[in-house]
Image: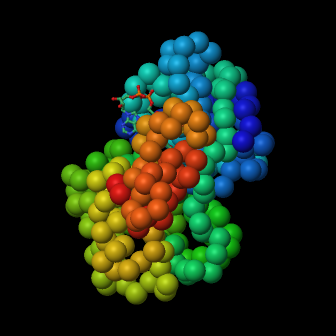
Amino acid sequence: MTQEFCHVQHVQQVADNVFVLTFSSEEISESIQPGQFINIKVNEGTEPLLRRPFSVYRTDRKQVQIIFNVIGKGTAALRKKNKDDWLDVLGPLGVPFGFDNDDYKTAILIGGGLGVAPLPILTKSLKKIGKGVVTFLGSRSSNHMAENHLENLNVATDDGSKGFHGTVVDLAKERLSVDMFARPKIFACGPTPMLRAVASMSNERDIPCEASLEGPMACGFGICQGCPVELIGSGKKYALVCKDGPVFDIRTIRI
Ligand SMILES: Cc1cc2nc3c(=O)[nH]c(=O)nc-3n(C[C@H](O)[C@H](O)[C@H](O)COP(=O)(O)OP(=O)(O)OC[C@H]3O[C@@H](n4cnc5c(N)ncnc54)[C@H](O)[C@@H]3O)c2cc1C
Ligand code: FES
């Protein structure tokens, strides 16, 4: 993990209230693993005081991209960044997706809303090692969907404005009932209700599944104890999302 002051290149709107910020960092671009995150101090002063965590969306040689919704102070400040503004970035942080092994053949990627964030760099890495990739992406409507840089994409919208009318998990269930994917493993990121539905689907169908959690954080590297997630089983009761995650085997956590 390093702290780096990075130059903003640009901020681009890609969907309703969805922005992609590009900054320069050869170090993060080369060292980040899919599912790891960076923790950004968005302003020099104390407003806001705490860093904000973001998945890395894409990398390209010396450039790094994050994708975000404007929610509160931190993301509003990011939205207003201009070329050559500085960002104070800590990273890479956390445990990446366990994608580089022989335990499975087909990666089933499931993203809900801005849970799409870690999927493009995961897709790129999966293709590099020759895994099959099928992606399911859900969002409120077609206007809110950031659907670029994904592979074999199936989309669902809550309002039916694009693709399947319903939740992304219902869409994935439908496809998994019809298509026989060779030795599948699920990689999921999205809001908690979506992850709960993914957890029960993976249990019912006995498909291994890793999920990236996006709860609130403070320090981002295990000092403040501010990001606990309950563990299932008899050993340790809690894990820290920032240090032991954000990616977890979905069967080991209570979400
Ligand atoms: C590992 C990790 C990766 C993340 N990656 C991304 C990403 O790629 N893109 C992205 O848009 N967001 C991502 N998030 C969430 C992101 O960090 C928060 O949305 C962001 O901190 C909001 O900051 P803010 O200052 O704009 O809002 P704040 O002023 O901090 O919050 C405004 C309101 O939103 C609520 N809120 C804040 N954060 C969250 C959250 N994580 N979940 C639910 N409610 C929240 C607060 O309770 C508050 O009511 C990630 C979070 C984690 C832990
Ligand atoms: S955010 Fe501080 S311990 Fe996880």
Residue farthest toward the top in the current orientation of the protein: 45
Residue at image position (47%, 28%) is 75
Residue 121 in the image, given as x and y percentages of width and height? 60, 56
Tell me if residue 23 comes above or below residue 210 in the rendering: above
Residue at image position (40%, 25%) is 72
Between residue 180 and residue 92, name the one nearer to us.
92
Residue 228 in the image, given as x and y percentages of width and height? 44, 45
Structure colour scheme: rainbow
In the figure, is residue 75 to the left or right of 29? left
Tell me if residue 103 comes above or below residue 86 in the rendering: below
* Residue 153 in view, yes or no: no
Quarter of the image where one finds residue 62: top right
Residue farthest toward the front in the current orientation of the protein: 234
* Number of numbered discs: 0
Tell me if residue 113 comes above or below residue 221 in the rendering: below
In the figure, is residue 82 to the left or right of 5? left
Position of the N terminus, as image quadrant, is: top right
Residue at image position (30%, 82%) is 177
Residue 195 in the image, given as x and y percentages of width and height? 35, 58
Residue at image position (54%, 33%) is 224
Residue 87 in the image, given as x and y percentages of width and height? 65, 26
Position of the C terminus, as image quadrant, is: bottom left
* Residue 245 in view, yes or no: yes
Between residue 225 and residue 127, name the one nearer to us.
225
Tell me if residue 221 comes above or below residue 131 in the rendering: above
